[in-house]
Image (cartoon, rainbow, N blue to C red):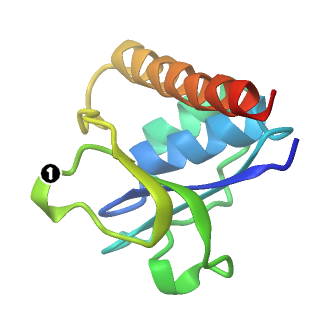
């Protein structure tokens, strides 16, 4: 199966989209080529995102938040925005989704783990959909 190219996007590219990219690369790298970016990158990744990604074996300690101009890849199958409402960034893709995910970067780590696991479930749904379409 050809890998699908997915861009996870939010405003700062410091928390939700970074978690999504790390989860996709950790669990679904056979099916997804994952990227993340933001419309106004903050320059750094939130420590809680780094922590919950380390727990699943993904090292984000040297990662940084990126803007759209930092992307080498320019064509995506999916654009997935992370619940940033009217200020969500737009980037061309064959399909786009807005996952209404709360920005809980300063909540207790247990809540952030739940968010990470919800992101994983949603990515798995995309992979399963792609597998069915290829059959």
Visible in this render: residue 57?
no
Within-10-Å neighbours for mark 1: few <14, some 14–19, many 20+: few
Q: Position of residue 59 (x, y in %)?
A: 73, 44
Q: Position of residue 98 (x, y in %)?
A: 31, 44
Indicate whether 49 appears above or below 80. above
**Observer-nearest residue: 134 or 15?**
134
Quarter where residue 42 is shown: bottom left
Q: Position of residue 49 (x, y in %)?
A: 49, 39
Instruction: Classify residue 90 as left or right of residue 52.
Output: left
Identify the residue at the far bottom of this view: 69
Q: What residue did someone put label 1 on? A: 85
For the N terminus, which image quadrant? Answer: top right
**Observer-nearest residue: 52 or 31?**
31
Visible in this render: residue 103?
yes
The residue that appears at 50% across and 72% down in the rendered structure is: 66
Indicate whether 74 appears above or below 49. below
């Amino acid at each position: 199966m050809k890998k699908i190219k997915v861009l996870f996007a939010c405003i700062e590219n410091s928390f939700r989209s970074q978690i999504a990219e790390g989860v996709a690369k950790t669990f679904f790298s056979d099916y997804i080529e994952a990227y993340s970016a933001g419309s106004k990158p903050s320059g750094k990744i939130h420590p809680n995102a780094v922590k919950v990604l380390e727990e699943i074996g993904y090292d984000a300690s040297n990662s940084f938040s990126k803007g759209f101009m930092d992307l080498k890849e320019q064509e995506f199958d999916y654009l997935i925005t992370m619940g940033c409402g009217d200020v969500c960034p737009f980037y061309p893709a064959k399909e786009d989704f807005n996952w209404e995910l709360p920005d809980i970067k300063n909540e207790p780590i247990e809540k952030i783990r739940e968010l990470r696991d919800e992101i994983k479930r949603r990515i798995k749904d995309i992979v399963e959909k792609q597998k069915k379409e290829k059959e």
